[in-house]
Image (cartoon, grey):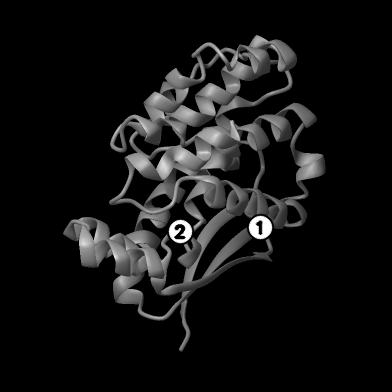
Amino acid sequence: MTPLLYYLPRATKDFTDHAIIHSYNLLRILCELRPVLDLTKTLTEEERYVLCLSIFLHDLGCLIDRARHNEFSAKILDVEGFDRFEYEIGSDLWTCVKYVSISHSSTYEFSDLPLHPINPNVRLNLICALFRMVDGCDLTQTRANPMLYKILMRYDPLDIKSQTIWKAHFNIKGVVFEKHGRSVLILISSKRSATTNVLTDHLKDDLVKINQILGQYKFPEFKVDVRAVS
C-alpha cells in the first residue's frame, strides 16, 4: 500500500498532495479530534478501524484520474492484491472502507449510501460524514510544497485553477479545533482570507450536509471560523 501512495503525484501534477503526507496529516487531525469528540466512547472500535484504514486508501484513485478519483479509489480496492486486507478484516468492514473512499468527495451524495447496515457495529453514514470533514480540514501548506510549486511554474506551469488552490494552501497557517458548548469551531488561521476563501468556503458548504448526519448521532455541530494572522 505505501509504495502506491508514493506514486500518486505522478498522475496529479496540477493538484495538491493526495499521497503519504496527506494521509499522515489526516491521522494527526483525527487524533486531535479524539479528545474534542471523545471518539473512544462515541465511536465503536470497528468504526475507528475503518476510519484509520480509509485515511491511507481513499485517494488511491488519483493514480488513474483526478476528477473521479473517489470512484476509482473504490474500484482499486477490488483489485487482486488487496484481497489480503479483505480476508483479514472481513468483507463487511472492507466494504465500509470502499464506501468511505467513494463518499469522501463532495460530488458524492450521502443519500446514495446504503441504508441497510453492512456491519452491525458500523454506522456507515456517520463515519463517511466524519471522514469527509477530517479530509476537508487538511488545508495547510503541507498540501502544496512551495519549492515544488516554483519548480513546476518554471518548467511546466500549473493551470490557473490549480495555481489558485496552491496559493490558498500557502496562506493557511494552521487549523485547530475548539469546543464551545454543543459546537466545535474549526479555527483556520489565514494570511489572506480573500485568497483562501476557495478552500474555506468549500469546507463551509460541505459542513451543511456533514452536520445533518452528525446531528443524528448527537455529535456537536462544526462551524468554520477564519482568523487573520500576519
Q: Position of residue 34 (x, y in %)?
A: 74, 51
Mark in the foreground, 2 or 1: 2
Q: Is residue 177 above or below residue 79?
A: below
Callout 2 amino acid: Arg
Circle 2 residue: 143
Q: Residue furthest bottom?
A: 230
Q: Position of residue 100 (x, y in %)?
A: 53, 30
Residue 63 position by quadrant: top left
Residue sitting at x 44%, y 27%? 73
Residue sitting at x 55%, y 32%? 57
| Among numbered discs 2 and 1, the one appearing first in the sequence | 2
Whether label 2 touches label 1, CB < 8 Å: no
Quadrant assignment for the N terminus:
top right
Q: Position of residue 230 (x, y in %)?
A: 46, 89
Instruction: Give residue 77's mark.
Output: none
Residue 36 position by quadrant: bottom right
Residue sitting at x 64%, y 35%? 51
- C-alpha separation, residue under disc 2 versus residue under disc 1: 30 Å
Residue sitting at x 61%, y 12%? 83
Residue 121 position by quadrant: top right
Callout 1 amino acid: Arg
Q: Position of residue 75 (x, y in %)?
A: 43, 18
Q: Answer with left or right where residue 110 lies relative to residue 91.
A: left
Q: Is residue 130 shown to the viewer in this render?
A: yes
Q: Is residue 1 above or below residue 89?
A: below
Q: Secondary structure at mark 2?
A: helix
Instruction: Give residue 182's mark.
Output: 1
Q: Answer with left or right where residue 153 lies relative to residue 133.
A: left
Closest to the observer, 52 or 226: 52
For label 1, count other residues whose C-alpha is less than 10 Å away and answer few (under 14), some (14-19) or many (20+).
few
